Image (cartoon, rainbow, N blue to C red):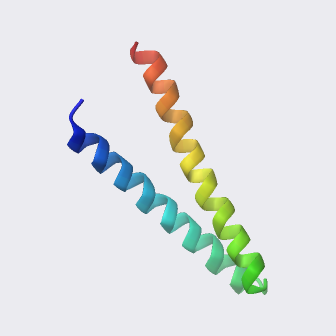
Amino acid sequence: MSIAVVLLSTALVLVVALLAAASAGKLARMDGATYPTALTHAATAFAGVVNLAAAVTAALAALLT
């Protein structure tokens, strides 16, 4: 696999994770949460997206070998 595909895939996952984190933080603030609580929600969303991407990658790697 080309290094460019790996870098572009990594960049896409990070952009999606950042968008999910920003959305979760904004929704938490709109719901009346404090800034530390909203930041915690955003961090949890970011970690969840990255974790999901890693799990999907591992599953696909296992299927392709």
| Residue sitting at x 58%, y 67% | 21
Q: Quadrant of the C terminus?
A: top left
- Answer with left or right where residue 21 lies relative to residue 11: right
On screen, residue 8 above or below 20: above
Using the rendered view, name the quadrant where residue 47 is placed. bottom right
Q: Position of residue 12 (x, y in %)?
A: 37, 54
On screen, residue 62 above or below 15: above
- Answer with left or right where residue 49 lies relative to residue 31: left
On screen, residue 55 above or below 16: above
| Residue sitting at x 25%, y 41% | 5
Using the rendered view, name the quadrant where residue 37 is placed. bottom right
Q: Position of residue 46 (x, y in %)?
A: 59, 60
Q: Quadrant of the N terminus?
A: top left
| Residue sitting at x 29%, y 47% | 7
Total marks in image: 0
On screen, residue 38 above or below 20: below
| Residue sitting at x 59%, y 45% | 51
- Answer with left or right where residue 20 lies relative to residue 32: left
Q: Position of residue 50 (x, y in %)?
A: 54, 50
Q: Position of residue 18 (x, y in %)?
A: 49, 66
Residue at far front of view: 3
